[in-house]
Amino acid sequence: MKNPLDSIKCMKNPLDSITGTIISGLVLTVILAFIANVLV
Amino acid sequence: MENEWVPLIARWIHFLAGIAWIGLLYYFNFVQAPAMAVANADQGGPGGAGITKYVLPRALLWFRWAALVTWLAGAALLGPRFVSAFTLQGDDAVIGIGAWLGTIMLLFVWGVIWPNQKKVLGLKPATDQEKAKARCTAFIFSRVNVALSIPMLFFMAASAHSVF
């Protein structure tokens, strides 16, 4: 029997894909590294 | 001698629990979620109900407690540098950024992911609509934690190297 929850889709965003998630993490790393460079 | 053992044990526990936490986070996102999508789409296949019933509750148990132990061991490891790290003072700003990211991730685990997963697993009463919303919320915050783990681990590693 089909689970009724399976037919409901989440809102689309870049974190839907693993690739998008990793790229987001890498971009955030670069931004925070610049901030760290200013702070230290 | 005794003062050296405390940070060593704290670092050891921090590594052990951190590997369990982030390892399970990556398992959820890189293995289980894609596998569940395939299993649910596989008409006539066994489906993913067994994973949801038998694997997910145990994985979430280790996941959320490992997250807490990681944070507590990290706090113990910071010791007298705790305040300067969290207020991003001087050289401690590097580990401080990592600590803030880890703290945000911990709050997402206990404050968002776990409460929503309880609805998905049926541990907390919810309608089908509420369960669907809870599943989406838990999924997106789990993905946010994967994204945050990348800079978090960079800053944890960077604190041991004089790159800034």
Image (cartoon, coloured by chain):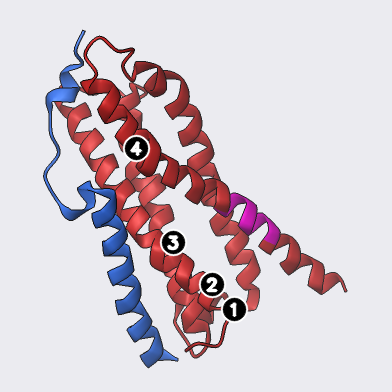
Extent of the magenta region: B12-18
Measuring from the top left, give residue B110's x and y in whole percent: 41, 46
Measuring from the top left, give residue A36's x and y in whole percent: 40, 84
Dot 2: within a 10 Å radius of its alpha carbon, few (fewer than 14), some, or many (20 or more) residues?
A: few
**Chain under callout 4:** B
Closer to the camera, A20 or B148?
Answer: A20
Q: Who's the residue at 74% across and 60% down the image?
A: B9
Residue annotated with mark 4: B115
Label 1 vs 4, first from the N-terminus: 4
Dot 4: within a 10 Å radius of its alpha carbon, few (fewer than 14), some, or many (20 or more) residues?
A: some
Query: What amino acid does circle 1 point to?
Result: Ala
- Chain shown blue: that is A
Label 4 vs 2, first from the N-terminus: 4
Measuring from the top left, give residue A34's x and y in whole percent: 33, 85
Q: Who's the residue at 44% across and 80% down the image?
A: B87
Disc number placed over residue B103 in the picture, else none = 3
Q: Is residue B153 magenta?
A: no
Dot 3: within a 10 Å radius of its alpha carbon, few (fewer than 14), some, or many (20 or more) residues?
A: some
Residue annotated with mark 2: B157
Vertical comparison of B7 with B121: above or below: below
**Chain under callout 1:** B
**Chain under callout 2:** B
Disc number placed over residue B160 in the picture, else none = 1
Q: Who's the residue at 56% across and 74% down the image?
A: B82
- Chain shown red: that is B
Query: SS for tag 1?
Result: loop
On screen, residue B13 versus residue A36, left or right, reads right
Q: Are marks 3 and 2 in contact (CB under 8 Å)?
A: no
Dot 1: within a 10 Å radius of its alpha carbon, few (fewer than 14), some, or many (20 or more) residues?
A: few
Query: What amino acid does circle 2 point to?
Result: Ala
